[in-house]
Amino acid sequence: MKRILLIGGGGTLGTYTAKELLSLGHRVDILCPEEKHSDHERLTFYQGYGTEDFLEQHFATRHYDGIVNFIHYPEIESYPPIHQLLMAHTDHLIVLSSYRVYADEQHPVTETAPMLLDVSTDRAFIETEKYAISKAKLEKYLRAECKGQPWTIVRPVISFSWRRFDLVTYYQDLLKRIDDQQIIPLPTAAKHLGAGLDWAGNSGKLIAHLLFKEQAFGEAFTVSSAQNLTWGEVAELYAELLDAKFRWVSTEEYLEATNNCNYYALLYDRLFDRTIDNRKILRVTGLTPADFTPIKEGLQIELKILKENLK
């Protein structure tokens, strides 16, 4: 039994990563801002933020076999002291990046695909976007300044759960639109593109199985079961399961209908083909396609959980 800390692990990915680690017989501590109570003898929650001060206090009497850090750092300058602190208190650190670091230049996408940070000529995007670009900068810091350390980069695709259901750039209000029987506009340009979408249970399983694999040290992995549904096929699942109604429109009309919300996520992700080649992560984890839950089944699981939580 190993002891593992999930920093910022109270959300979608952390919940399923913890579930898989517990099933493997490990002990899991979760640090998150919310007050949570454990229903498992090997799971403990600690309420707090992953700041340098809090972590120093937490680590005063603890060492972890593994740490998974789910926190996003919009400004890369804030990360190095955190990294050095984490490395001093674990034997393997997994750092969360994102599949959104990839440009649209390799199909299917593998871990060697070029990064947007390196190839994009859109200076406004490079200078102002605080997710894909920040993740790429974090990765560059690790490779340049932390060589030889036992860290691993994970790049999860969009991972849905009952907390959020995704369709192109809709997520927070998608189910409300469906419940209100709206005819929801979707961009035709995305209809036949690989969606880069997976059930959080599959993503959490992959992350959990990367821990303690020496072949993963100093490496990056796209986290996906690679079922590679298109956005059109995802829309069909919502139509089948929830009687959702959609109309396919031009990109301009879609942006107008969504008030340009998540503009960069649309332009530099959802309108890219995110068909994934996941052979690298399967090779290192030892998992196979048979170990994953179909996306339709994952949607059904999460919709059932949501319904139970609303009672």
Image (spheres, rainbow, N blue to C red):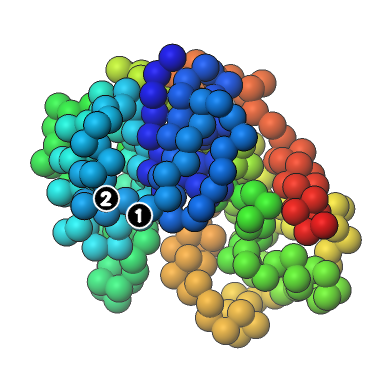
Pinpoint residue 160: horizontal percent, then vertical percent.
62, 50
Label 2 crowding class (10 Å Cα cut-off): few <14, some 14-19, many 20+? few
Q: Residue at x 24, y 63 (%)?
A: 75
The quadrant holding residue 144 is top left
Question: Disc 2 marks which residue?
Answer: 54
Q: Quadrant of the N terminus?
A: top left
Q: Tell me the kind of residue under disc 1.
A: Tyr
Q: Is residue 291 shown above or below 306? A: above
Question: Is disc 2 placed on a helix, strand or loop?
Answer: helix
How far apart are the two marked residues, 1 and 2, measured between alpha carbons?
Answer: 7 Å
Q: Which mark is residue 290?
A: none
Question: Disc 1 marks which residue?
Answer: 49
The disc, 1 or 2, on the residue closer to the chain's N-terminal end is 1
Instruction: State if disc 2 and disc 1 touch (CB < 8 Å).
Output: yes
Q: Tell me the kind of residue under disc 2.
A: Phe
Q: Residue at x 51, y 53 (%)?
A: 35
- Horizontally, is 151 left or right of 190 in the view? left
Q: Is residue 65 visible?
A: yes
Pinpoint residue 58: horizontal percent, then vertical percent.
28, 41
